[in-house]
Image (cartoon, rainbow, N blue to C red):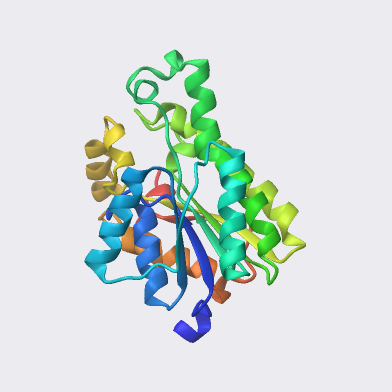
Amino acid sequence: MKDLIQLKDKNIVVMGVANERSLAWGVAKSLFDVGANVIFTYRKERSLGKLEKALANNDFEAKLIVECDVNSDESIKAAFEKIGSEVGVIHGVVHSVAFAHAEDLKNDFLQTTRDGYAFAQDTSAYSLIAAAREAAPFMTEGGSIVTMTYLGAERVLEGYNVMGIAKASLEASVKYLALDLGKHNIRVNAVSAGAVRTLAAKGISSFNTILHKIEETAPLKRNVTADEVGDMTVGLLGNLSRGVTGEVVYVDSGYNIMG
């Protein structure tokens, strides 16, 4: 199977590891398993410390670790230029970055502030566009970009609020980027992950209720793991999915199909 995936020794950038419970870390583990060269970006020193701890705990060695503030065009550009200069060719990018202000998740959606709305969009959706733009010149052999989304992009999930709007924007961006980058043999897809206990999930007041509802309702009668999300992401990064672009692939025990 590793040979079919064809990611051994390929350079894959993973953005958004906050700690060992992050979806991005689940992806990174799956990438290490298939022999990829994993390059990490981090935003702040605190995130760097947690990333380095996760690598040490699992006896993994990153190809490269680069600072990248996704709210800054200059920082994104500098990060990918550094990655390109170090490794030459980028074969894939995993965008697992999203954030909204706590008050915009706790209050009614009606109370979303203008600044809060713009910040959630900038961090969670526009950052994919900016990262794709800066990565593309180094993806000279084609490749794959995968982002992380959630069912709240298309259904109203209590407490998800402004993040649902940002994820809807993210999913639309995936489709438009797929069109723009397809001529360069770069594919762009999204993984819509089920509820996983991550740092981001702590901000959603109804999260425990969502977990129980999925266990009761989903065809598989269980929640998914970050490892399962990671394995599907590897599938979308590798050769097995070479004919797939512009898609949202659900890894949620089938919960999204239920009425």
Say whether residue 241 is left or right of residue 137.
left
Q: Report the front residue among 88 and 124.
A: 88
- Work out whether residue 225 can be spotted: no
Query: What residue do we see at 31% from left, 58% from top?
Result: 52
Kindly indicate the quadrant of the structure image that contains residue 184: bottom right
In front of the other: 229 or 72: 72
Q: Nearer the viewer, residue 242 or 89?
A: 89
Q: Is residue 192 visible?
A: yes
Q: Name the quadrant of the C terminus.
A: top left
Q: On the picture, is 211 further left or further right than 100?
A: left
Q: Nearer the viewer, residue 210 or 198?
A: 198
- Measuring 51% from the left and 76% from the top, which residue is drawn there? 7
Q: Please state the horizontal and vertical placement of residue 3, each as a whole percent of the image.
A: 50, 86
Q: Residue furthest top?
A: 111
* In the depicted structure, whether residue 203 falls above or below residue 104: below
Give above or below for 137 relative to 166: below
- Say which quadrant the N terminus sits in: bottom left
Q: Residue at x 23, y 36 (%)?
A: 209
Q: How many marks?
A: 0
Q: Which residue occupies 22% across, 38% down?
A: 208
Residue 54: quarter of image: bottom left
Q: Give x and y (percent) for residue 90.
A: 60, 66
State the image coordinates of residue 15 (x, y, percent, origin top left).
Answer: 46, 53
Where's residue 94, x and y in %? Answer: 50, 57
